[in-house]
Amino acid sequence: FCKVKVEHIDYKSLHVLHRFISQYGRIVPKYYTGVCLTHQKRLSKAIKVAREMALIPYVR
């Protein structure tokens, strides 16, 4: 995200969010994904919003 200068991570872009969710439905930590702290917080917030909107399941 830092390399391509992404400012906003949308909760509706499910194909992007699924890359950062484990097979059990948990958010993958930043030391596995290589994402900086700022974008990891934005990712987790977008994933949580998508879960609230029932776009992503809480568990698989």
Image (spheres, rainbow, N blue to C red):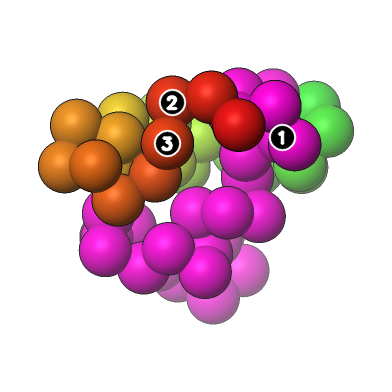
**Mark 2 near mark 1, Cβ–Cβ under 8 Å?**
no
4, 22: nearer the viewer: 22
Q: Nearer the viewer, residue 27 or 38?
A: 27
The three-letter amino acid code for the residue at tag 2 is: Tyr
Q: Image check: 39 left or right of 18?
A: left
* Numbered marks: total: 3
From the viewer's side, name the closer residue of 11 and 34. Answer: 11
Question: Where 28 sits versus 54, above or below?
Answer: above
Per the image, the residue denoted by label 3 is 57
Q: Which mark is residue 3?
A: none
Q: Position of residue 48 (x, y in %)?
A: 31, 30
Q: Which residue is mark 1?
A: 22
Magenta region, main secondary structure: loop
Element under label 2? loop
Asked if labels 3 and 2 touch by Cβ distance under 8 angstroms, the answer is yes
Q: Residue at x 60, y 24 (%)?
A: 26
Magenta-colored stretch includes residue 18: yes
Q: Which residues are magenta?
A: 1-29
Separation of marks 2 and 3 at Cα, in angstroms: 4 Å
